[in-house]
């Protein structure tokens, strides 16, 4: 690698940090023309190699939540040092408390945290403040991969303040100069009840008859783990469930499964958390990674506590 390029890479790795050499070595594997994209001949499911071989310290922001706890368990089982970070563990990404300490020595930072509020202004403040703090600390720690979980269709639904906040988060990550990967997942089976509740007016649920392709939280965690232990994509990886439904029909199924007396009205003008929907707003594009758990199988497992 020529000296000028090594100097630029050293700058991106923040000269003076104790892990600069590791970060430069990661960049050394990546062709200059790719600007940080996956090294030639390395598949997305191969582990990144650092100074400690294939075993990595991976800090999971939001590691006490639904996806985070599953992700930590999965990464630990693979032999990595997975560190959960959340207010429960003394890490506050809004104030910065504990962030630098927990990220010290991290090879990879994974953000699967979520805003406590779905309201647009509050969500924007959360994601921008939290992400800026995390990116600065990740750069200082010399982390070689920054991964964040987002939502399929976020860029297609600007009417939703929450999804605009997620897009703002993604833009900060992409502009940071750190090697990164963004995982866009479809809606979780675990959140379908919330979708129905948000669309309820009295005893009636108004849902648009558009496509939706939900997936199990376990499969989301598996998909994020695969991306985390691969090389940075510097782009988006989409993941979705194995089945497509009409949103209104799925709503009826959710109510029937709970013997809920509410009725669903098929309403093409119904909003989805404030956003107008088109036919494919909520489904991934061709080429997305498809998970294996079907809705009926997930329901069976949930019923039996597995």
Image: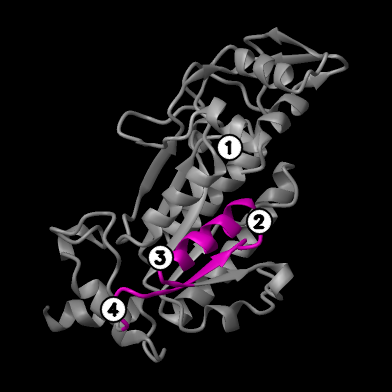
Where residue 265 sits, quadrant-wise, is top right
Residue 179: mark in rendering = none
Residue beneath the point at 39% across and 92% down: 16
Decide which of 171, 134 is in the foreground and name it. Answer: 134
> Is residue 95 visible in the rendered structure shown here?
no
Q: Which mark is residue 53?
A: 4
| Residue 21 in the image: above or below residue 76 | below
Magenta span: 52-81
Q: Is residue 135 visible?
A: yes
Q: How far across and how far down the image is residue 25, in percent?
A: 24, 79
Distance Cα–Cα, label 2 vs label 3: 20 Å
Residue 200: where, in percent of width, then height?
A: 79, 21
What whole-number distance in Å separates the C-alpha atoms at marks 1 and 2?
Answer: 14 Å
Q: Reply above or below: 251 against 148.
A: above
Q: Which residue is mark 3?
A: 78
User: Which image quarter holds the N terminus?
Assistant: bottom left
Of labels 3 and 1, the one closer to you: 3
Numbered disc 2: secondary structure: loop
Callout 4 secondary element: loop
Compared across the picture, whether 142 is left or right of 185 comes to left
Q: Which residue is mark 2?
A: 65
């Amino acid at each position: 690698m020529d000296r000028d390029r090594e100097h630029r890479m050293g700058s991106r790795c923040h000269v003076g940090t104790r892990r600069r050499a590791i970060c430069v070595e990661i960049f050394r594997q990546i062709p200059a023309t790719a600007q940080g994209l996956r090294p030639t001949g390395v598949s997305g499911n191969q582990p990144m190699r650092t100074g400690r071989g294939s075993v990595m310290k991976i800090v999971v922001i939001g590691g006490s939540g639904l996806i985070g706890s599953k992700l930590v368990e999965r990464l630990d089982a693979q032999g990595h040092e997975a560190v959960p970070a959340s207010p429960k563990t003394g890490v506050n990404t809004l104030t910065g408390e504990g962030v630098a300490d927990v990220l010290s020595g991290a090879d990879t930072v994974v953000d699967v945290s979520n805003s406590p509020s779905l309201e647009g202004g509050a969500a924007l403040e959360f994601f921008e403040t939290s992400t800026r703090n995390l990116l600065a600390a990740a750069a200082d720690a010399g982390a070689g991969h920054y991964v964040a979980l987002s939502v399929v269709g976020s860029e297609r639904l600007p009417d939703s303040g929450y999804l605009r906040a997620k897009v703002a988060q993604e833009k900060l990550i992409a502009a940071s100069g750190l090697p990164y990967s963004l995982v866009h997942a479809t809606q979780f089976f675990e959140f379908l009840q919330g979708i129905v509740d948000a669309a309820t007016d009295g005893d009636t649920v108004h849902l648009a008859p558009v496509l939706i392709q939900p997936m199990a939280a376990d499969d989301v965690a598996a998909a994020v783990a695969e991306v985390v232990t691969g090389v940075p994509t510097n782009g988006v990886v989409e993941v979705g469930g194995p089945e497509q439904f009409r949103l209104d029909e799925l709503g009826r199924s959710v109510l029937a499964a709970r013997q809920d007396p509410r009725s669903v009205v098929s309403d093409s003008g119904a909003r989805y958390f404030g956003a107008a929907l088109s036919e494919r707003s909520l489904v991934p594009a061709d080429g997305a990674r498809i998970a294996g758990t079907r809705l009926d199988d997930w329901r069976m497992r949930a019923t039996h506590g597995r």
